[in-house]
Image (cartoon, rainbow, N blue to C red):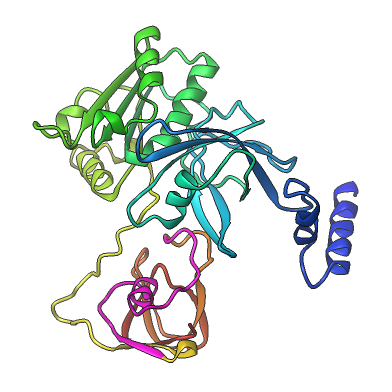
Amino acid sequence: MASRLAGLLENLVEATATPYPVDRYLEFVSPMLTWRETHAKVVGLEHRTDRTVTLTLAPTRQWKGHTAGQYIEVSAVVDGVRHRRFFSPANAEQDTKTIELTVTAHDDGFISKHLRDDLGLGDVLTIGAPAGDFQLPAARPERVILVSGGSGITPVISMLRTLIAEGHSEPITLVHYARTPGDVPYAVELDVAARTLDNVDVQLHYTREADGGHFAPEHLDGLADAEGAQVFLCGPPSLMAAVREYHDERGLSDRLHSEAFTIDTTPVIDPNQPITGTVTYSESETTSENDGRTILEQAEAAGLNPEFGCRMGICFSCTKVRKSGCTRNILTGELDSEADQQIQICVSAPVGDVDIEL
């Protein structure tokens, strides 16, 4: 009853605060004074590599912590425009008072470069509730293998820290792939863990070294197939695909658990059905020839700037109305041609002529 009354009170307050949500008014008083939203102040900032920034955030009262492996939406206002991206907290799940994010700035990463280069102590971000099924099982495995590449290290370092904080004594192996030794933001911590904890083994591979450091079967032989082993994988598409293939070929797919923060949007071309048609962006009075990519990518190539968040079909920030035509969901392969339907343009590719309300 109490929670229901609280909910009714919140709705009443929101209704009287129109035309804007209550949080928009509270921001004028203090960005850390919130009603519904969760905000987080930057209280720590460290550049451990040339391409990354590690942020320590102090969240508002709404934050209840995360489960190791999950991700959160992070939004920041840049030049009056709110941008959203997803990042995994790197701290152990036992730490519910702060949030640690390590952000890798990519060449085409507008918001990641902003977080690395422009954010300062005292700045405030808006964050979402933790989500995602990439988690350690409640009954911890007899042997844990953590495999990551690049920025995929953040959810697995959270898992490693969580297990260490629990006093987990079963074998843990972390296999990480980076461009160079200077591209591992947690290198010092991993070295200390490997040297001081008998059950922790760390293997680092560098893809830009002379002998190459890309995934090879011998990196997991004797680990993934060990009795009681469970593998937790997060990294770029090429690594994900190689590790999945390794498990498929050995009949170990049921042991593999994975999370991806990018998706492969390369057009799937059927030689019997060549890519044709025109994409019409009706509100912008713009058209482009269909090249098979997602509508979001084609719109950007046409000079438009549609709103988006995750670029992988999670956050629904890019939802637009397909007025006519057929689209294919690149995640599921499903075709849909019903008129006047909302679709996520980051995971929808046009099939033939399409008119999108954009």
Q: Nearer the viewer, residue 87 or 133?
A: 87
Does 102 appear above or below 288?
Answer: above
Residue 270, picture quadrant: bottom left
So how many labels did they put on this image? 0
Does 307 appear above or below 354?
Answer: above
Q: Nearer the viewer, residue 341 or 264?
A: 264
The residues colored magenta run: 286-311
Residue located 30% across and 64% down the image: 265
Residue 251 percent location from the top left of the image: 23, 38
Residue 110, picture quadrant: bottom left
Q: Is residue 262 visible?
A: yes
Name the outermost residue toward the left. Answer: 211
Q: Is residue 290 magenta?
A: yes
Residue 239 percent location from the top left of the image: 25, 43
Q: In screen coordinates, is 318 left or right of 255? A: right
Residue 142 percent location from the top left of the image: 40, 20
Q: In screen coordinates, is 86 left or right of 200? A: right
Does 14 appear above or below 198?
Answer: below
Residue located 77% across and 64% down the image: 21
Residue 314 percent location from the top left of the image: 49, 59
Q: In screen coordinates, is 182 left or right of 185? A: left
Q: Nearer the viewer, residue 125 or 92?
A: 125
Residue located 20% across and 28% down the image: 219
Q: Is residue 353 visible?
A: no
Q: In screen coordinates, is 221 left or right of 99? A: left
Q: Is residue 91 magenta?
A: no
